[in-house]
Amino acid sequence: MDANHPIVLFDAECVLCSANAQFILTHDRKQEFRLASMQGEAGAAMFRAHGMDPKDPDTILLIEGDKVLRDSDAVLGIYTRLGWPWRIAGLAKLLPRSLRDPVYRWVARNRYRIFGKREACWVPRPEDQDRML
């Protein structure tokens, strides 16, 4: 684990999740985030450490030290740290989690059907390799 950087755990076979990972790497100007796919050794171990099966994930996780965010809180936690204009997504926190999370969970459950599944895991650009765990 990298205690100095927040870690995003994601599904590298999911087209939507991979696109989100690429978006984070592109727009994280301060290069704060580290990413780990659940298909990789480090990512799978972190998923298991937080009580999730890496073979059947139901959410993205954002790990910041001892704090773990999931579902819509994780997504909003990521986007608010990306700076302007992406931090405006934080306004969604005005909606109660009881409204945000069901929408997130529906998309998460149906992500392969709606967005597709990659035949092979997404691989980051060479210049982003040092930000992957």
Image (cartoon, rainbow, N blue to C red):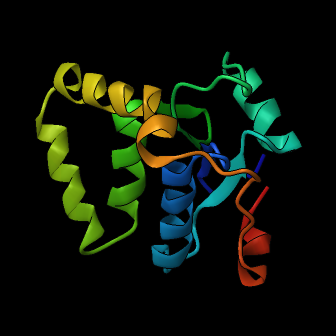
User: In which quadrant of the rendered image does the N terminus lie?
Assistant: top right
Q: Quadrant of residue 49?
A: top right
Residue sitting at the far bottom: 127
Residue 4 at least partly seen: no
Q: Nearer the viewer, residue 92 or 30?
A: 92
Quarter holding residue 87: bottom left
Q: Is residue 133 left or right of residue 4?
A: right
Residue 43: horizontal and vertical position, in percent?
76, 41
Q: Quadrant of residue 123?
A: bottom right
Q: Residue at x 26, y 29 (%)?
A: 103
- Residue closer to the observer: 35 or 32: 35
* Residue 74 locus on image (x, y percent): 43, 40
The residue positioned 71% from the left and 19% from the top of the image is: 53
Give above or below for 50 relative to 7: above
* Residue 116 image offset from top left, x and y in percent: 52, 46
Which part of the image, by quadrant, shows the C terminus? bottom right
Residue 61: x, y in percent? Answer: 55, 37
Q: Nearer the viewer, residue 7 or 5?
A: 7
Picture layout, residue 40 above or below residue 109: below
As displayed, is residue 25 above or below residue 63? Answer: below
Residue at 77 percent across and 53 percent down: it is: 120
- As drawn, is 31 to the left or to the right of 23? right
